[in-house]
Image: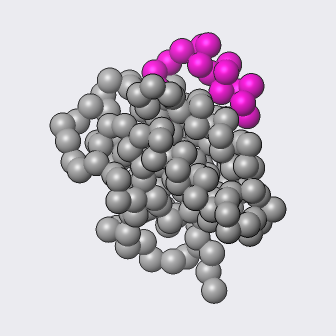
């Protein structure tokens, strides 16, 4: 049985979510999406009553969180802190800002300033997940997460 690392992508902007999810999915990882801090937090804490499957207190099926820094009332750093509290590493993507980068580092999260390239994102994913994806064919349409927003106008350029 092959194990595919499961990555939760939390992005407020539909086009950013779609781009990040498609890169991670194409690389062979399992992907779920959430479009807000609240839905990302709910997804992280959903597994807490099921008990730890890998020594973590919640969401035993999630191996990594990738979040936009801008998520409404809260931000991706808040989600990174929540993930860290249950043993899940995080990548936060946002505009270049030294204070945010320092805060992410203090939380043990990886901060990628600007919209990363596919290679930059996947290198960060591999570094945090600690393994290559299993050789399982990607579904391309297998990105789960019923609360993901539909396609919208391209807004990813604002992160550059």
What secondary structure do most residues of the magenta stretch adopt? helix
85 or 156, nearer to the observer: 85
In the picture, which quadrant includes the C terminus?
Answer: top left
The residue sitting at 28% across, 48% down in the picture is: 149
The reply to whether residue 74 is in sight is yes
Q: Residue furthest left?
A: 153
The reply to whether the magenta stretch includes residue 94 is: yes
For the view shown, which residue lies furthest in the front direction? 49
Q: How many marks?
A: 0
The answer to whether 31 appears left or right of 124 in the picture is left
Measured from the top left, where is residue 52 in percent x and y? 75, 65
Q: Residue 108: horizontal and vertical position, in percent?
A: 73, 34
Residue 94: percent from left, percent from top: 47, 27
Residue range (magenta): 93-108
Q: Quadrant of the N terminus?
A: bottom right
User: Residue 39 location in percent, x, y?
Assistant: 45, 47
Q: Is residue 105 above or below residue 89?
A: above
């Amino acid at each position: 049985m092959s194990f595919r690392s499961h990555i939760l992508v939390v992005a407020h902007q539909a086009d950013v979510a779609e781009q990040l999810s498609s890169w991670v999915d194409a690389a062979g990882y399992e992907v779920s999406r959430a479009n807000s801090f609240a839905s990302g937090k709910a997804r992280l804490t959903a597994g807490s009553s099921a008990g730890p499957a890998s020594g973590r207190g919640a969401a035993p099926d999630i191996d990594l969180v990738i979040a936009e820094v801008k998520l409404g009332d809260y931000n991706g750093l808040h989600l990174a802190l929540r993930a860290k509290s249950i043993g899940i590493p995080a990548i936060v993507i946002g505009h270049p800002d030294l204070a945010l980068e320092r805060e992410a580092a203090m939380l043990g999260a990886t901060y990628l300033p600007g919209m990363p390239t596919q290679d930059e994102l996947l290198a960060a994913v591999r570094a945090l997940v600690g393994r290559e994806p299993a050789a399982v064919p990607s579904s391309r349409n297998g990105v789960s997460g019923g609360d993901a927003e539909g396609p919208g106008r391209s807004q990813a350029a604002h992160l550059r």
